[in-house]
Image: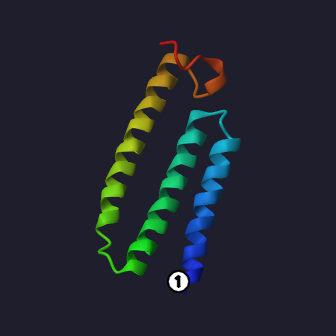
Amino acid sequence: MMSQSWLVSVLILMSGIISFVLNQGHLLNSLLSLEMIAVGVYMTLSWIFIGLGYEVYYSLYFLIMVVCEGAMGLSLLVIMSFSHGSDYMDSFGMLVW
């Protein structure tokens, strides 16, 4: 059972990385891919901590950072959609504000 869960977590991580690399047109797609990567890393960390006998609460620190990253990404999405009218990343320069 543990090997199947390990395989699922690595599969989620790799599909998130592939999705992030291939779908960079919209900011929302990029943010969803980053969240998928974070879920895969969280599951992998949890299985590593369980396998080594550590406490699982260390992975909660990682979840705190992921939640902060998600909140900042959503605020960036709202700001960009108000200022540019869409989340399409090719329609504006990222360095020009």
Q: Residue at x 61, y 26 (%)?
A: 89
Q: Please state if 43 lies on the left or on the right of 55 as rendered.
A: right
Taking the spot 65% from the left edge, 57% from the top edge, the residue there is 15
Q: Position of residue 38 (x, y in %)?
A: 48, 54
Q: Residue at x 57, y 34 (%)?
A: 27
Determine whether the residue tagged by mark 1 lies in a helix, strand or loop: helix
Q: Mark 1 sits on what residue? A: 2
Q: So how many labels did they put on this image?
A: 1
- Residue in the foreground of this view, choosing between 50 and 38: 50
Question: Residue 50: which quarter of the image?
Answer: bottom left
Looking at the picture, does residue 93 appear above or below residue 36?
A: above
Q: Describe residue 78's horizontal placement relative to residue 6 as left or right.
A: left
* Residue lying farthest to the top in this orientation: 96
The residue at the far bottom in this view is 1
Percent coordinates x, y for residue 55 in the rendering: 29, 74
Residue 46 image position (x, y, % from top left): 41, 70
Residue 87 position by quadrant: top right
